């Protein structure tokens, strides 16, 4: 996703976000789901912010109050001490810094080195020095992955750390980007988001994704300001409404394709639309099921192919559905269809890409080199676009 400033004239950008309001927070996933997926509606009324299908919304979250208090308690601070932010001349209270300016997770080797230099207790110091040993790189990586700053302060209390020293070890709290799930032609001054809420446990403590739990738990609808900006993307709809469109968006990867379909309906686009969606269970994880089934009935969707991995003994994924319909996908591509993918980059997008190459080989009669060249040309022509993360 490409971060960019808002359009000229709005006055709002990554460096000057708009204080929006969440006006709807609705659970999408059903009973029995292993996931917590929510639909958020964010009001940008009065901002002049413009977006197009394929763009993302950047959100600046705040950290959970309990996590801030845990660190302040270990620092023996009331939160009022002034600190200078890293790589900045700005001074704020340590409470404000920990709440909205700094990441409370992701300590680095430098943090362990600092604590080792400060620890008075010999057992604590030996443990820290052991993690820094030349042959201990895997142990250090595992340790840092499972520890946040509050954990380190709790586990090594003999290492005195001042508020300013701690701040110097921390990283800036960055905005998070979410694919927009609405068309502005339809939603007006609203932005819709499809967000999987991240909750997990490490080192015996319950954790949560900073921004997803901010939206789900800490934002009071209609009240809490949510600083936002639009991140413009090269990922988007075909320029011609007559072009056919194949969309592959399992899980929350469905978000931009909901926007695509709403926009294609609003503009009266004549091109055919084919959606591949997948998740774990149809009964609990078919996001926007009623919307997409209605689109299939009224013809906006020419095809809707579903893959629910846990509804049968053998797992079925979107790439499996692609394989089953390889001949038809090839026919659509030969007629100029666009192929768009959104979602997990590590596994899904790679598997979908491999299947697209396989379709070119099997149904296009191409050898490996020709298939690679064909897919490469699709990308060059912007007929194969990906929004992966």
Image: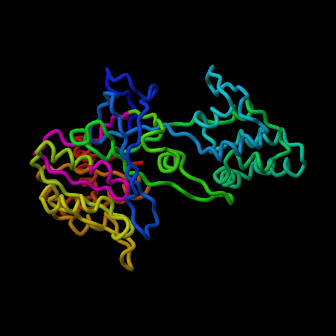
Residue 247 vertical placement versus 189 (above, below) = below
| 235 inside magenta stretch | yes
Report the front residue among 102 and 323: 102
Q: Position of residue 147 (x, y in %)?
A: 68, 51
Question: Horizontally, is 5 left or right of 62 in the view?
Answer: left
Q: Is residue 364 visible?
A: no
> For this rendering, which residue is in front, 80 or 103?
80
Q: Is residue 245 magenta?
A: yes
- Residue 20: quadrant of the picture: top left
| Region rendered in magenta | 230-258
Task: Give the camera-side residue of 317 and 208.
Answer: 208
Q: Residue at x 63, y 32 (%)?
A: 96
Q: Dividing the picture into quarters, in which one does residue 246 lie?
A: bottom left
**Which residue is at a point 37% across and 70% down the rendered structure image?**
281
Colour convention of the picture:
rainbow
Residue 272 visible at all: yes
Q: Is residue 134 left or right of residue 340?
A: right
Percent x, y for residue 123?
88, 52
* Residue occupying image coordinates x 21% and y 58%: 366
Q: Position of residue 314 (x, y in %)?
A: 38, 77
Relative to 248, 177 lies left or right: right
Give residue 274's position: percent from left, percent from top. 19, 57
Classify the position of the N terminus by image quarter.
top left
Quick one: 175 or 92, which is closer to the camera?
A: 92
Give the residue furthest to the front: 223
- Count of marks overlaid on the render: 0
């Amino acid at each position: 996703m490409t971060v960019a400033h808002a359009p000229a004239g709005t006055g709002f950008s990554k460096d000057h976000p708009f204080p929006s309001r969440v006006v709807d927070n609705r659970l999408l996933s059903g009973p029995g789901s292993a996931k917590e997926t929510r639909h958020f509606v964010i009001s940008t009324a009065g901002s002049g912010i413009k977006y197009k299908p394929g763009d993302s919304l950047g959100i600046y979250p705040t950290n959970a109050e309990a996590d801030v208090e845990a660190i302040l308690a270990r620092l023996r601070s009331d939160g009022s001490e002034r600190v200078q932010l890293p790589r900045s001349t700005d001074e704020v209270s340590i409470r404000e810094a920990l709440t909205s300016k700094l990441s409370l997770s992701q300590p680095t080797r430098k943090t362990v080195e600092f604590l080792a230099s400060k620890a008075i207790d010999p057992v604590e110091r030996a443990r820290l020095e052991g993690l820094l040993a030349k042959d201990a790189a895997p142990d250090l990586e595992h340790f840092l992955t499972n520890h946040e700053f509050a954990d380190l302060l709790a586990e090594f209390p003999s290492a005195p750390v001042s508020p300013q020293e701690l701040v110097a070890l921390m990283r800036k709290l960055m905005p998070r980007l979410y694919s927009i799930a609405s068309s502005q032609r339809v939603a007006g001054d609203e932005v819709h988001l499809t967000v999987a809420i991240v909750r997990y446990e490490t080192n015996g403590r319950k954790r949560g994704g900073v921004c997803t739990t901010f939206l789900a738990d800490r934002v009071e609808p209609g009240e809490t300001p949510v600083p936002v900006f639009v991140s413009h993307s090269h990922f988007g709809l075909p320029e011609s409404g007559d072009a056919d469109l194949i969309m592959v968006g399992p899980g929350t990867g469905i978000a931009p394709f909901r926007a695509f379909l709403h926009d294609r309906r609003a503009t009266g686009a004549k091109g055919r639309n084919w959606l591949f969606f997948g998740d774990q269970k149809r009964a609990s994880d078919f996001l926007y099921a009623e919307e997409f089934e209605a689109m299939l009935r009224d013809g906006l969707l020419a095809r809707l192919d579903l893959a629910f991995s846990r509804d049968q003994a053998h797992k079925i994924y979107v790439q499996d559905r692609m394989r089953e319909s390889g001949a038809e996908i090839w026919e659509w591509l030969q007629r100029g269809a666009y192929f768009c993918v959104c979602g997990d980059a590590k596994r899904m997008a790679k598997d979908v890409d491999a299947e697209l190459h396989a379709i070119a080989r099997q149904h296009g009669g191409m050898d490996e080199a020709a298939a690679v060249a064909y897919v490469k040309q699709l990308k060059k022509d912007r007929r194969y676009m990906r929004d992966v993360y």
